[in-house]
Image (cartoon, grey):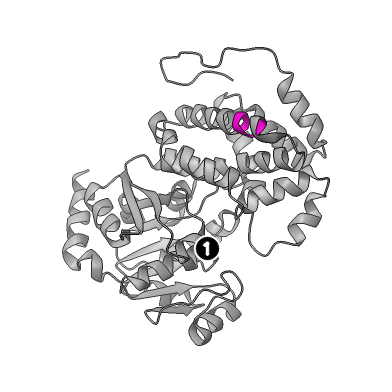
Amino acid sequence: MGESVKQGQQIGRDRPPTAQRVGVIGAGAWGTALARHLARKGLPVTIWAYEADVVESINRQRENHRFLPGVALPPALSATNRLAEAVRDRDWLLFAVPSHAARAVLRQLGPLLAHPVPVVSATKGIEEGTLQVMTQVMHETLPSATHPLLAVLSGPSFAAEVCQDQPTAVTLACRDELVGRSLQEALITPLFRVYASGDLVGVQLGGALKNVMALAAGIVEGLGLGHNALAALITRGLAEMKRLGVAMGADPRTFYGLSGIGDLVLTCTGALSRNRQVGIRLGRGERLDDILKDMQAVAEGVRTSQAALGLAERHGVEVPIVREVCAVLFEHKPCAKAVTDLMERAAKAETEASPSGGGRA
């Protein structure tokens, strides 16, 4: 803790939060929206994009035509497809690469960090195979001096609404209080409120698992099952998220906050939710492969569902909704049959007390 605080204090003295230079890694809709948000505060921001046409579009047309069309980008935001340029002389980095590509990019990023800087993960997913959340992947790929400075940004935040200056509130989790406070100040505006947390695991699980529940919520809508079923799905989905989180060492209170129930409600009910749209089309009888071919952006819940089920099995946690979503996605189980199997499970108490705050479904 002492070393972490020293690093945090040093970073805090280098430059005030409102003048910090930021590198954003990943130019999808969310990465671009956050880069725009920071640049509009007057912070010099460089965003890294894998796609050359995205770099050209941002620098020349001041728009990310591929992932965030129609949104004007400020002059303080520049784009590059060279990682070294995006991290050079930056005070902190914001990482917004989809989870399936995160490790490959982080492996390239690690050797470029000449000195420790905070790295904020805005990626909402779990790595397949390893079943790791993004900060765990960062521990394996970034220099050890960076580990105490890792942070997570999550919460109910559609990129399009942030760019429309709609009021938004999110959670920033960081174990180093001084670093977290500096990042919080750099990100916060009157229309973008940032709350602090120290629960990196819980905040990341909430941001990842809500996408799986949004697939289920979309299936409910696609089948035309009504508001009663949707309300039950959201409530029981939250119970699964909390059970798994507690088993992994998260604070159960996190799941009743913005990165838990807040993001869950938004993603399960909002028309802009990609995962919900995938679920709706599945419920209407479309094939997953055909749905994904039509999508420009990533629906993280499709990949996260199998990882979530793997984590639940590893920790001995019952997650019936996640299990049925996986059966629909990867075992060609009819959506209506999945719903019937959930409803016909053996009768249980709604809550079961346990010392850890967990319990079974």
Q: Which residues are magenta?
A: 229-233
Left or right of 6? Residue 224 is right
Q: Position of residue 309 (x, y in %)?
A: 63, 34
Residue 87: image location, x then y, percent: 38, 71
Q: Please state the horizontal and vertical placement of residue 263, each as a whole percent of the image.
A: 49, 44
Query: Mark 1 falls on what kind of element?
Result: helix
- Residue plotted at (38% across, 31% down): 253
Magenta stretch: dominant secondary structure = helix
Q: Is residue 321 magenta?
A: no
Q: Residue at x 57, y 46 (%)?
A: 267
Residue at the spot x=80%, y=45% of the render? 284
The quadrant holding residue 304 is: top right
Task: Say whether residue 131 is visible.
Answer: no
Residue 311 visible here: yes
Residue type at the position of mark 1: Ala
Hey, which quadrant is residue 187 in on the image? bottom left
Q: Which residue is mark 1?
A: 160
Residue drawn at x 57%, y 77% as measured from the top left: 54
Screen quadrant of the N terminus? top left
Q: Is residue 74 above or below residue 103?
A: below
Q: Position of residue 282 (x, y in %)?
A: 77, 45
